[in-house]
Image (cartoon, rainbow, N blue to C red):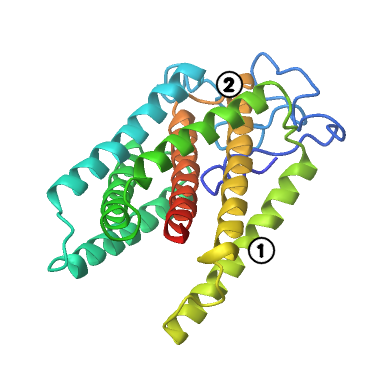
Amino acid sequence: MRSSNPVFSRRGFTRDAGARAGYAGFNTAPQAGGTAVGTNPYATNPYAADPYGQAAGRSGAMTMDDVVSRTALTLGAVVVTAVLSWLLLPVDEANLGRSYGIAVGAALVALVLGLVQSFKRRPTPALILAYAAFEGVFLGVLSSVVSTYIASGVVIQAVLGTMAVFAGTLIAYRMRWIRVTGRFYRFVMAAAMGFLILMAVNLLFSVFTHGDGLGFRSGGLGIAFGIVGILLGACFLALDFKQVEDGVAYGAPREESWLAAFGLTMTLVWIYLEILRVLSILQNNN
């Protein structure tokens, strides 16, 4: 199965042709070497000829501990730079324009770094951590602006909400309440494409009309679309969990855990921004 995340899309996460009714790639047992065509999602992976990385000097296959530790490092970089940017870049009326400029600049740099990594054949930890750092600057400045001028107190609520969505999705995935099949993947990707198109159209209208565009980001309609965005983020998390589970089960190289951390971080940032937006609208409407 192809991943929902562009980070995974070049890594051979292919759907098992025989998995029509069950989980993609999980109806057959993993092979000892992890390279059997038709059963191993990594059979077309650039690492497949050496799944354990011994010839290249890598040490072993990816484990869940690897994913957890790399994700902790990546999210830690986001949190640290977000806190520092909040504390060191004060948001006031005199510096508001500069703060917006820093936030937009950091977001663009993070976008470029993310795209570069997504098109690389192998993960680059320094590039992933740099992406996380610039993403943290963007989130820190944006959160400070929202807390100061739009809706005070919502940042902590958004963080807690993001953690709750992550935990709830993980529990639902582990309990198999969410079945990650080919149909599930296609539905999520179609819904995400429609969501992003509508948001892009709304942004264009807001630029030309100097208002709220089509109203997808304010009022009742904005809340509805924000909830849809959160649900899509939860679906992306389920797909990311599936990719991690595939990687561990089929002996992906240990360095692939950096891609798992990268993908999970991108999804969690998405969820945080959508929750922050919904909470801001709700507080302003009260």
Q: Residue 224 appears in which quarter of the rendering?
A: bottom right
Instruction: Name the secondary structure under disc 2.
Output: helix
**Mark 2 near mark 1, Cβ–Cβ under 8 Å?**
no
Residue ID at (62%, 53%)? 228
Q: Which residue is mark 1?
A: 194
Instruction: Give the x, y percent position of residue 8.
Output: 56, 42
Of the numbered discs 2 and 1, the one sitting upstream in the chain is: 1
Q: Give the amino acid type for the residue marked by disc 2 in the picture.
A: Val
Residue 122 visible: no
Residue at the far bottom: name it.
208
Q: Residue 129 appears in which quarter of the rendering?
A: top left
Residue at the far front: name it.
286
Vertical position of residue 204 compared to residue 97: above or below:
below
Instruction: Give the x, y percent position of residue 138.
Output: 30, 54
Instruction: Name the secondary structure under disc 1.
Output: helix
Mark identifier at residue 248: 2
Residue ID at (18%, 43%)? 84
Instruction: Give the x, y percent position of residue 266.
Output: 46, 45
